[in-house]
Amino acid sequence: MAVVSVGAALAQMMLDEDKRELFKYRAEQDCTHEDGVYRDIFDGKVYQDFLFNQQQLFQDDSDIGIVLHTRHHMITLAIIPGPSKPDNIMSFLRPIVDEIRSLGNNGFRVLKDNNVIYKGKVHLMGVMGDIPGVADLMNHAGHMAYHGCRICDVRGVSDGARYFLHNGNIRSRESLVHGDPSPPMGQVPELLTSLSTFCGVEFFGIDEMHLIGRGIGHLIFNILNASCNESYIIESGSSYSFRLKNPLRRTNGMAIVQNQVEVCASKVPPIFEGSFHVSFGRYRAVDWQNFLCVIVPNIILPYLVEYEAKKALMCLINGLMWKHGTNTCVIKSTLPGVNSSNVLLNTINLQQYGITTSLANNDQVNADQSSPVSFVSHPSGNDQFPQLWDPADEAYLLSNGVITPDLRDQDLVVALRSYYRRLYGDQSIIDIGTNSILFAERLWTDSIVISSLSYRKKKTLTTAADNFVLFEAGRYRSLRKCWFVGEVYTYFQHTYDDQVRFLAVVDVMKNHKLDQFNIPMAEKDVEHKHFAVLDVADILECVGLLQYSATKNKFKVICPYMRYDDKVGGRHDGMLSDL
């Protein structure tokens, strides 16, 4: 397993002056007192006593505080190889924890131009994951055991299922370190309990989206499922708020939904966590998140009879999406081919700052690395900006040829000319230069890889389409921004007016609009192609398409964690005439 050095990753982060200032904040905190002013709070128990709008947020011991991790402060250190679950997860975590322990004892320094710009120590303050993951970390039997709570010693009772009717005693630090003979509960692995920061049950956190997915997602499924929602119906007849229209109101209604999801799965990109192919009975937490936030609003919602029920569900879904933003980092993809290239880029980035010592014995250096010619860096020279992957061996001269069976040279010339007219606000632009371009098959942007139709045909890929994009464009001589959806045919590099640009050619859909709950919808023109050229910086998201009716060319547009009330960032519905 390739592991990124904690010290090297933090050193890279500390080279950013803004991030460095954030880390200095607590050490340089002014302790002077001013009545009525709270500058910062480092004590969790004090924080719990705070009032917000004259309300006590933590009125009960069961109230939970949520921690927000911003995307720019996340680091991926390793991805445990699959597909099977590891027998001993501690064997994978040991190198990381041991390095953190060493950095906590000895500290580290970051040098730039032979000057120390930062020095500090690193400590592991806690670990978190989903419910099964935290159970593995704690050497706990899991939530289905008789002692199913990882925090207390409550014992469950069984009556066809496991119930916990009483409160238990919170497990002490000694109980976690040494284990309990009665009730029989195992000890937390020594790798974690030996840390100076290990404090007890508070050391372990839970990913709240696992609770939302497996908890709320499954609850909504049961409420909507005609075969098991009897317990939610107070009175017989039409009074049930979440009753559905035919055919979903039948007992096999969810089976119909499952079939519809499987039909759409081929147009759902792999950036979605979970699977759109598994049955409801085999759902994991991430699958229930997809059910709640994607399947319910896009497929099930139109079948609800009551408008207020639709409105309530959409408020819930938008609230969840408002909370759960994407956490990305340089090394993100779990696909080996993509991730190896991301690791290579991260290594190059470290090496250009002279951070080589910590990488010398790292497995990633000896990994099968991509050739430097396998991607084209952004003209700005910034390695965090988009990159063109899998470029052609040589430039292509546009003439009267055919790029793909559906895309001719002249189609691209016309679309390219229209792009520059929109960009410069000049309808008189006719000559766009030498017409010599460099094609590429994939795009790396914002830590994800978006492919093209040319790449998918070359690799004979027919599932998990990852070449549909949501993008913005402005009308000719207008400040108004519109949103569009299209299928990327190819990427290319083009020079005009002495500027090098990364562009994409896209077959744009027609009839873009938002439904009554602001869910984006688009219709594919099955008779004609509508090619447009856009700057890759105008790509907003890699999206999936869900066929929501019997009409095969009408789709709802989905992407991970889409907030429907955001109305695509307030952009106008695009029309082909805008391009």
Image (cartoon, helix red, strand yellow):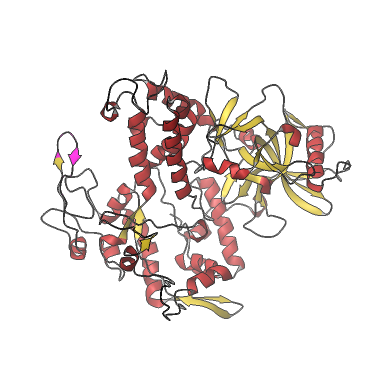
Q: Indicate the position of residue 70 as horizontal and vertical percent values.
A: 49, 57
Any magenta on residue 575?
no
Q: Which of the 4 image quadrants contains residue 229?
A: top left
Residue 294 shown left or right of residue 534 in the figure: left
Determine the residue positioned at 38% across, 56% down: 66
Dominant SS in magenta: loop
In the image, farthest residue toward the front: 54
Residues shaded magenta? 158-166
Determine the residue positioned at 41% across, 51% down: 80
Q: Indicate the position of residue 252 as horizontal and vertical percent values.
A: 36, 20
Determine the residue positioned at 34% across, 21% down: 238
Residue 579 shows up from this direction = no
Q: Which quadrant, please, contains the N terminus? A: bottom left
Q: Indicate the position of residue 172 as horizontal and vertical percent values.
A: 19, 63
User: Foreground: 164 or 15?
Assistant: 164
Residue 462 shown left or right of residue 124 in the figure: right
User: Foreground: 339 or 370?
Assistant: 339
In the image, farthest residue toward the left: 182
Q: Indicate the position of residue 149 as horizontal and vertical percent values.
A: 22, 50
Q: Is residue 7 above or below residue 134?
A: below
Residue 247 shows up from this direction = yes
User: Foreground: 116 or 519?
Assistant: 519
Q: Which of the 4 image quadrants contains residue 381?
A: bottom right
Determine the residue positioned at 31% across, 20% down: 237
